[in-house]
Amino acid sequence: QVQLVESGGGLVQAGGSLRLSCATSGVVAEINDMGWYRQSPGKQRESVAVITSGGSTNYADSAKGRFTISRDNAKYRVYLQMNSLQPEDTAVYYCKAEGLLLSSHSFNAWGPGTQVTVSS
């Protein structure tokens, strides 16, 4: 079993910043892609940023230039630095990780989400 737990969400004014963190626990052998996704009311969950184990990144157009994803491979953690936040960034942000357990079974896990609210 793998569990992900996000932290760092909250209420911020437009133009402000937040740093999200995601901690991983479980019998993990390796983690490949880690990413951040978000979902706002009435909308589908969308990818915000993804980072590979080698450090390659991919951002949604809405995140480019404002958000930065990073990871600590030794601690199985992933982060999302969000700057210049706008009201349209308001959503529940989810962490996702894919990899292998010590049993050699693959896993694809989601965290429960953290609320980010940006006021105008």
Image (cartoon, rainbow, N blue to C red):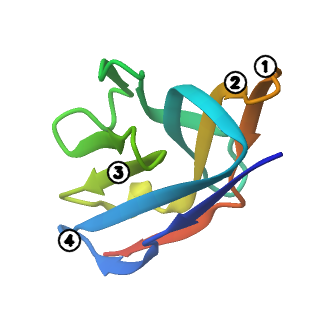
Instruction: Report the front residue among 15 and 77.
Output: 77
Rendering coords of residue 42 (x, y %): 73, 51
Residue drawn at (48%, 62%) of the image: 90
Instruction: Report the front residue among 114 and 65.
Output: 114
Q: Amino acid at mark 1?
A: Ser
Q: Amino acid at mark 4?
A: Gly
Q: Tell me the distance, in whole angstroms, between the alpha carbons under discs 1 and 4.
A: 42 Å
Q: Tell me the distance, in whole angstroms, between the alpha carbons under discs 4 and 2.
A: 37 Å
Rendering coords of residue 111 (x, y %): 68, 54
Rate crowding at label 4 as few (under 14), some (14 to 19) or many (20 or more) other CA atoms within 10 Å: some
Please report whichever mark, 3 or 1, sits nearer to the chain's N-terminal start.
3
Report the residue marked by disc 1.
Answer: 104
Q: Amino acid at mark 3?
A: Leu
Circle 3 or circle 1, nearest the eye: 1
Position of the N terminus, as image quadrant, is top right
SS class, disc 1: loop
Rendering coords of residue 22 (x, y %): 50, 56
Q: Is residue 32 above or below residue 67?
A: above
